[in-house]
Image: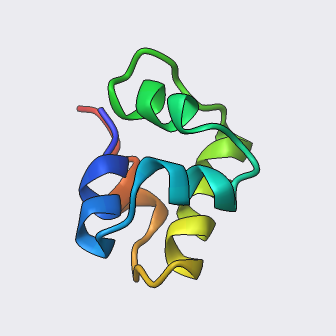
Amino acid sequence: MNQIAQQRKLLNISQAELAGKLDSGPSRISNFEASIRKPNLKTCWMIVNALNELGANCTFEQVFPNPK
């Protein structure tokens, strides 16, 4: 499970705002947050970078923790 929603909520930004940073639609972010769709590695890095550009201070591992 990813922590996209938690990081996004800490920034107080909407799915649409994050999606805009990724040139994507908010439904795509919603699907990632709900684990309906799984982002590929490149998209994961894009999400982490976008969150940090929007003001977060998060690592890849914080957003996409290693499942045990």
Residue at the spot 44% in from the left edge and 70% down from the top edge: 59
**Image quarter in which the N terminus is found:** top left
Whole-percent x, y for residue 47 in the image: 58, 55
**Image quarter in which the C terminus is found:** top left
In this rendering, the answer to whether 66 lies above or below 14 is above
Residue at the spot 45% in from the left edge and 24% down from the top edge: 31
Count the marks: 0
Whole-percent x, y for residue 53 in the image: 59, 80
Whole-percent x, y for residue 61 in the image: 39, 58
Residue 29 as seen in the image, left or right of residue 20: left
> Which color scheme does this rendered protein use?
rainbow
Residue 54 as seen in the image, left or right of residue 4: right
The furthest residue to the top = 36
Whole-percent x, y for residue 19 in the image: 60, 49
In this rendering, the answer to whether 65 lies above or below 17 is above
Residue at the spot 52% in from the left edge and 50% down from the top edge: 16
Residue at the spot 66% in from the left edge and 56% down from the top edge: 20
